[in-house]
Image (cartoon, rainbow, N blue to C red):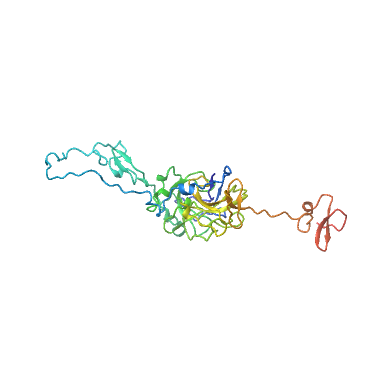
């Protein structure tokens, strides 16, 4: 399964030209994604609601534990001071870095490592929380402040089609650390991925898929990128986004086949099932899982055990997911040559007869009109 990112058209900045807000061809449903048919099991995604890792404050302490030092202590009143002394010339092997580290090693001091890491034994250990060195520029509000907000001639302005929405972005990165430093706390959300339409180059931006928050003053566009501007009031969770125009509020529109869908629904991003709204009707199970297989969780409603979907939605066979069916307008009735070309409305042997009720097809010669 794969999420189809919303498309945007970009205008590259140059030192000699001002950069305006880019025209965008953003999908009217706020971004589409594809749901892939499962194996028909009635257990579609239900286990992932409890297995999903979460960064929410309510769960941040559930897996933590304090460690108590149980090493026995020794009274020091009878200790020979010479036996307990330490030769100050001997380095502590457990300390960070060390005099034995050289510039050829990974690190000498903690400052040589990425944020969150410690230099131990000339190696950077621990999970990094950012980059030791970021690229130039800033994810500024180019809609208000123009090119100056990007703080780099390499920056451009990307938007979603709304003239009041946009953000500075940077192309031709190879990894996240080539990108500008984000606001504190959002280091792990910096992405180096292709996001601009018609361009395979990798772009720097702050991602917000799977229910991730955006920095202050920004909001999540298309369940993908943080931008400045006023967040529009979009389609509510689980609503119809394939027959109704509009952007899904806080999420994306997921369907079985975005170019030619047969069903779909608005899927808000989530970190845990508690982030998902409970519909007012039906008893379908609410699940938070990565249905698009892109490491971003979305809210969905499962119906594999006979649950009833919310009003207007139906249980999709083979997927066990509640979704809205595409509404295909019925073709005009045969014989309506009043509103259709006669060659389309009538058989080759018929003519269009003008009657008080309008033009109708008839196999008998009459007053034909075209």
Q: Which one is nearer the viewer's eye here, 335 or 256?
A: 256
Which residue is farthest bottom?
356
User: Quadrant of the image for the C terminus?
Assistant: bottom right
Residue 136 shown left or right of residue 98 in the figure: right
Give the total of numbered labels: 0
**What residue do we see at 63% from left, 49% from top?**
262
Would you identify the image quadrant in which residue 246 lies? bottom right
Q: Which one is nearer the viewer's eye here, 312 or 145?
A: 312
**What residue do we see at 40% from left, 45% from top?**
177
Give coordinates of residue 61: x percent, y percent. Answer: 37, 52
Whether residue 333 can be seen here:
yes
**What residue do we see at 24% from left, 38% from top?**
93
**What residue do we see at 55% from left, 60% from top?**
280
Whether residue 17 can be seen here:
no
Q: Which one is nearer the viewer's eye here, 143 or 98?
A: 98
Give coordinates of residue 34: x percent, y percent. Answer: 56, 47
Residue 303 shown left or right of residue 64 in the figure: right
User: Quadrant of the image for the N terminus?
Assistant: top right
Would you identify the image quadrant in which residue 356 lies? bottom right
Which residue is farthest right?
365
Give coordinates of residue 164: x percent, y percent. Answer: 50, 60
Give coordinates of residue 25: x percent, y percent. Answer: 56, 53
């Amino acid at each position: 399964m794969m999420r189809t990112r919303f498309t945007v058209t970009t205008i590259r900045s140059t030192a000699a030209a001002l950069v305006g807000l880019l025209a965008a061809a953003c999908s009217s449903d706020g971004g589409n994604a594809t749901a892939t048919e499962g194996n028909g099991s009635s257990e579609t995604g239900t286990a992932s609601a409890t297995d999903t890792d979460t960064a929410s404050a309510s769960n941040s302490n559930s897996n933590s534990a304090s460690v108590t030092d149980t090493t026995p202590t020794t009274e020091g009143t009878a200790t020979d001071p010479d036996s307990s002394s330490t030769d100050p010339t001997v380095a502590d092997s457990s300390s960070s870095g060390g005099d034995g580290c050289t510039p050829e090693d990974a690190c000498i001091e903690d400052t040589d490592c990425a944020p969150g890491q410690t230099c131990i034994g000339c190696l950077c250990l621990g999970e990094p929380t950012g980059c030791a060195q970021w690229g130039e520029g800033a994810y500024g509000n180019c809609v208000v402040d123009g090119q100056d907000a990007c703080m780099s001639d390499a920056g451009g302005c990307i938007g979603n089609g709304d003239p009041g929405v946009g953000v500075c972005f940077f192309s031709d990165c190879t990894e996240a650390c080539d990108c500008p430093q984000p606001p504190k706390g959002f280091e792990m959300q910096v992405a180096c991925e292709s996001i601009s339409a018609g361009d395979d180059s990798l772009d720097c931006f702050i991602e917000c898929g799977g229910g991730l928050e955006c920095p202050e003053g920004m909001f999540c566009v298309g369940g993908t990128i943080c931008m400045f501007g006023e967040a529009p009031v979009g389609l509510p969770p689980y609503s119809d986004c394939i027959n109704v125009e509009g952007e899904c509020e806080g999420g994306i529109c997921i369907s079985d086949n975005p170019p030619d869908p047969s069903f779909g629904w608005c899927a808000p991003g989530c970190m845990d099932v508690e982030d998902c709204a409970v519909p007012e009707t039906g008893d379908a199970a609410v699940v938070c899982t990565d249905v698009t297989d892109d490491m971003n969780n979305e809210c969905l409603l499962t119906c594999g055990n006979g649950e009833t979907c919310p009003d207007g939605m139906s249980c999709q066979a083979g997927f066990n997911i509640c979704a809205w069916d595409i509404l295909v307008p019925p073709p005009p009735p045969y014989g309506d040559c009043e509103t259709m070309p006669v060659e389309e409305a009538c058989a080759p042997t018929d003519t269009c007869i003008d009657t008080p009720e309008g033009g109708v097809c008839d196999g008998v010669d009459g007053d034909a009109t075209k």
